[in-house]
Amino acid sequence: MDEILATMTLMRINYFSLSGLTLLYRELGSAQTIIEHHENIKEIFPDASEKLVNGLRNIDEARKRAEVELEFCQKHGIMPLTMNDERYPARLRECDDAPLMLFYRGNADLNQQYVINIVGTRRCTEYGKDMIRRFVSDLKMLCPKVLIVSGLAYGVDINVHRAALQNGYETVGVLAHGLDQIYPPRHRETAVQMISQGGLLTEFFTQTNADKVNFVRRNRIVAGMSDACILVESAERGGGLITARLSRDYNRDVFAFPGRVGDRYSEGCNNLISSNGAALLSSAQSFVEAMGWITDAQVNEARQQGIERQLFPSLSPDETLVVDTLRQQNDMQINMLAVKTNLPIARLTALLFEMELKGIVKVLAGGVYHLLGS
């Protein structure tokens, strides 16, 4: 049984309680290893729950269902992404309750340099729609390469996706059901466009209904795969607030647009700001500055003034080697950098730390090193 089929089988066994299974997966390193020990899992992992132990003893039905799912994926161009797949969102992988597998249909890189989610009420007002349009448009002028994530739901979500598409951004919708359907159906046209300019992502098998509990579960994916959460509008209670809370739990930055006192769908945002649960967001410029992102304008200005080399003062020969390597292919993990530069890992680790302090490189999610100003 290969890793993809083994992972699908495990997901079916422990479908609604993944935390223990994820811990086991991280401990043993692969789904195939778990399956190989399915009859004596307690011996190698004493903390395994009785539900998981019983499920592993009877894997035949789960395997059959996994085979059906894999066939569906192959037929419809869906990519099953296990946690060991380099295409799996690296930021999400850091979270304790990350799903063992994601089903993905699209063409966007889920590990782009910048990833944000924009969420909020399903009853988006004209004020909220205007905030979305202006923010996304202004952000595009500052940082053209940002992946925008939301949930394809009514209100804020669908307006976010459409604004992203209109401004040339890639946008990913995280679904609360399988990829055999689109909910709500009226968003199908936008979803189809997103497949070629972003994508659709879910942890759920086909034939899974869009039940209320699934929307709550999918919010952790929205939060975990992003650098920051932006809450546009929210009543006193709502799914957007859940995503904001999860984002804080994952140590992500949280922002909220303020609204007029007394407006029902600004109440959640205003409360979050006043309790220091979110930073007040007034513009794309203030957001970029708060995140410490390098804008295209800053890079272009440096290049126009001919000071690109001055961004990297007093480079040692090894530092120059790293800079030249990242100029040829930016955003590399340390293992790949070690291969390309032929520098020992220990030396490279110390070198990159010094270069980060000098403002030459920046560490992105997943241990990826990015050359600033390039």
Image: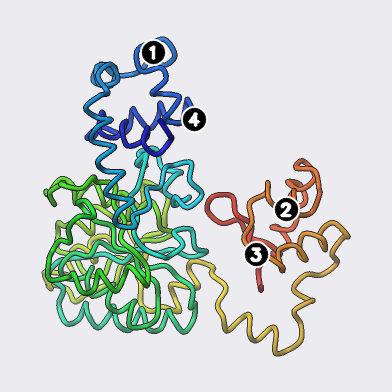
Disc 1 from disc 3: Cα separation = 43 Å
> Which of the two discs, 1 and 3, labels the residue nearer the N terminus?
1
Q: Is residue 286 depicted above or below 178 in this figure? A: below
> Which of the two discs, 4 and 2, labels the residue nearer the N terminus?
4
The kind of residue tagged 2 is Leu
The kind of residue tagged 3 is Asn
Q: Is residue 324 depicted above or below 22 in this figure? A: below
The residue sitting at 21% across, 69% down in the picture is: 233
The residue sitting at 60% across, 54% down in the picture is: 368
> What residue would you read off at disc 4?
29
> What residue would you read off at disc 1?
46
Identify the disc placed on residue 330.
Answer: 3
- Mark 4 crowd level (few <14, some 14–19, many ≥20, 10 Å Cα): few
- Circle 2: element type: helix
> What residue would you read off at disc 2?
352
Q: Position of residue 316 (x, y in %)?
A: 87, 60
Disc 2 from disc 3: Cα separation = 14 Å
Disc 4 from disc 2: Cα separation = 28 Å
- Circle 4: element type: loop
Disc 3 from disc 4: Cα separation = 28 Å
- Judging depth in this view, the residue of 223 and 209 nearest the camera is 209
The residue sitting at 71% across, 58% down in the picture is: 357
> Which of the two discs, 3 and 4, labels the residue nearer the N terminus?
4
